[in-house]
Amino acid sequence: MNEAPDTATPSGLASIEAVIAMLAEVGYIATRPIATALYLAHHLRKPVLIEGPAGVGKTELAVSCARALQFALLRLQCYEGLDDNKALYEWKYGKQLLYTQILKEKIGLLVDDADTLHGAFARLAGFQDLFFSREFLEPRPLLQAMEQRGGSVLLIDEVDKSEEAFEALLLEVLADYQVTIPEIGTICARVPPLVILTSNNTRELGDALKRRCLHLHIDFPDAALEQRVLRARVPGIGAALLAQLVAFVQSLRVQNIRKPPSVAESVDWARTLVLLHAPVLDETLVRETLGVLLKRETDVREIDGQLGALTRSALAAAGT
Amino acid sequence: MDSVLAGFVRALRAAGAEASTAETLDAARTLALMGYAPRADLKAALGLVLAKSEEEKCLHDQVFDLYFSLPPEAQAAATEAAAPSRAGPPRTGDERIDALLDLADDRRGPAGAPGDALRQALARAARAAGVDEIRFATQAGYFAGRMLVAMGIAALEQRLAERLGDERPDAQAEAQALGAARERLRRQARALVQQRFELFGKPATEAFMTEVTVQRALGRLAPAEMERMKAAIARMAKKLAAHHSRRQRRLLRGRLDLRRTLRANAGHDGVPFTLAFKQRRRDKPRIVAVCDVSGSVAAQVRFLLLFLYALHDAVGELRSFAFSNRLKDVTVPLETLPFDDAMALILKEVGHGSTDYGQAWADLHDRHWDGIDRRTTVIVLGDGRSNGTDPRLDLFAELAARAKRVLWLCPEPPGRWGSGDSAILSYRPFCTSLTHCATASDLERTLDEALEAYH
């Protein structure tokens, strides 16, 4: 359990360029700051806290990283009321009860020939270790991450939805990459996992957790980056349509709407247009498929009046 | 640890982006891992390690650009100094002076900017002269002088003085060259000191000025200080909002919730392995602000409303009323218009007329009573001077009974309460608290207490 940590660096994390190449292989287009964050996270052994609007690829980064490095992905989704039973480990109470019931007679036999109460206790003392052994332990994501032999990516999603008590628990685990179970002992991570925390900023995270992590902010991409992302995610898209699409989405983001479309939504829209075999953008097509981009009724109504103008300017900007 | 990194972290701290010791150590490890070039990567990497929020990232980017680049004045000074085309600087025969002349003429950097040798010499001199201690813009000349002395300008000046006294033409030419070199060095040193002031001195002065402004009486702010006050209030409000936004639900440990426990342990045959405790759901604060907008109180009203609207993320519901002789609901203009326009509109519509508190309570009772319930905190801002009209204590008593708390903020000092037509002492028994509120920190404290009551 407490073996020396394995410190070999996988080839995908050897340098910033290697990180970018590795992620590009699985279809995630990473900017240099993102690649730098992953590189430092591995070499400095620190978790990465990613903040940014919804849908820009925070969770997707962890998933792609795990896939590219062929590590196990352990995912812990945070919510209010998450405690160490659901995050660290839990005892299999049902199993313990069941075994006790089934083995009642056997236990009775074993303790039978002890004359004194003291003797009976001495016999029973050994059993406790059996019933609180590794077999009856249900590991949850944090403990599972510590136990992975070949390295893992631990994704703690939406950590701002959890409570402060959970942050204290996280700090303890992330500080030394070890978990202490009173009955069994301390389990150190053989290969420290690559920890990625995501946050939607619904509340301020505690200072201690923020200071412990590397802080990465992923914002909406610019036109060139978005084109690369769409080309990677939607392979069948034509170049003209791609340019117009990106120009339209970029112009939509600066409008006065509550929820600007993110990268996930523009990928969905691109897929929709490819499915509909649309060669170029036009106003009717945009009007019909606007629900894929804008998810709020108020936003759709707001944009409705300007749709024609926006489409025309997008076509002009794309150079057709 | 690297002195460059140490200087950078010090500049960050001076600018207000706190970089703790642990983070500095991480930055040192990052540098050991990545080295100093290329610059964009270094900026990203240091930003990841040292800046842990949006604000800090902006500050970090600014300070990085300022710290790791040449001061713009230095570049300008180097390019505009018209150098007559000749082979090189004149030799004087004295080693130290020749070295200085070489440095002054060093324009081997890109686009005629000072080359490495001059930059290094300047940096060494700056360290020797303690330029990083600069606090005020007026110290720039003094520090520039000390830098030049550290570079050894004394010998050059002495020689210059000698040559100026000499009548021969070659001596005059040499004096001219020496003078030009001295001038160039002086400009370079000045530019560097200016840059260091921007990095280290200016943020410290700003912080000091803000601290002073926050303590000043709101009614006596000069227009120039208004902007600083607004920024300070926005910051205080953000801190309060962050502090009070947490803890929506408080766990009452020790009081077992039997029903939920049994439910949770149904799978274990009722044996209570998992315990569930009772929880109390916390109400989000609801605040109603009632403000007297007559002349004497206008400045305080402005800042109170600014504070409240900056806080509105932490506050569940905020409604504002302004009155002088009639009460008017001003929530809508404050929410839709920019703050200054809304204040101007309010003062125009409501601000004329003599103050009548009794009428204000009557108007509140007639039209807006439903907005006040047992979860509401009512904040009254006024001096209680009702011009002798009926104070309607009965309505005020009803208001106090109905609301959760009533906080009265008075801009007058306690010594003047009850004097003249001030009815404030008769309102006092019904208020939860009556405080003298003259400065921004008083406002902050009152609002902190108000929000604290909701925990």
Image: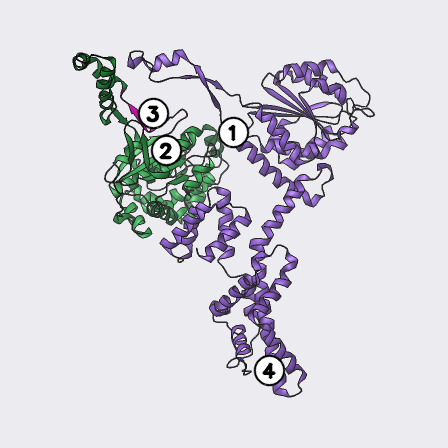
Chain colours: A green, B purple
Q: CA distance from mark 1 to mark 4?
A: 72 Å
Q: CA distance from mark 1 to mark 3?
A: 26 Å
| Figure quadrant of residue B275 | top left
On the same chain: label 1 and label 4? yes
The residues bearing labels 2 and 4 have C-alpha atoms spaced at a distance of: 73 Å
Q: Amino acid at mark 3?
A: Asn
* Location of residue A228 in the rendering, given as x and y in whole percent from the top left corner: 34, 47
User: Label 2 vs label 1: CA separation?
Assistant: 21 Å
| Residues drawn in magenta | A78-92
Question: Which is nearer the eye, B227 or A185?
Answer: A185
- Say if residue B107 shows up in the picture: yes
Q: Chain of mark 3?
A: A
Residue position marked by numbered label 3 in the rendering: A85
Residue A81 falls within the magenta-colored stretch? yes
Residue B150, percent from left and from top = 57, 68
- Residue for badge 1: B245
Label 1 crowd bin: few (<14), some (14–19), many (20+), radius 10 Å: some
Q: Residue at x 29, y 31 (%)?
A: A185
Q: CA distance from mark 3 to mark 4?
A: 85 Å
Position of residue B297 measured from the top left corner of the image (x, y, whole percent): 74, 31
Q: Is residue B384 magenta?
A: no
Q: Secondary structure at mark 1?
A: helix
Asked if labels 4 and 1 touch by Cβ distance under 8 angstroms, the answer is no
Q: Which mark is residue A157?
A: 2
Chain letter of mark 1 equals B
The label nearer to you, 2 versus 3, is: 3
Q: Which residue is mark 4?
A: B174
Observer able to see residue A277 = no
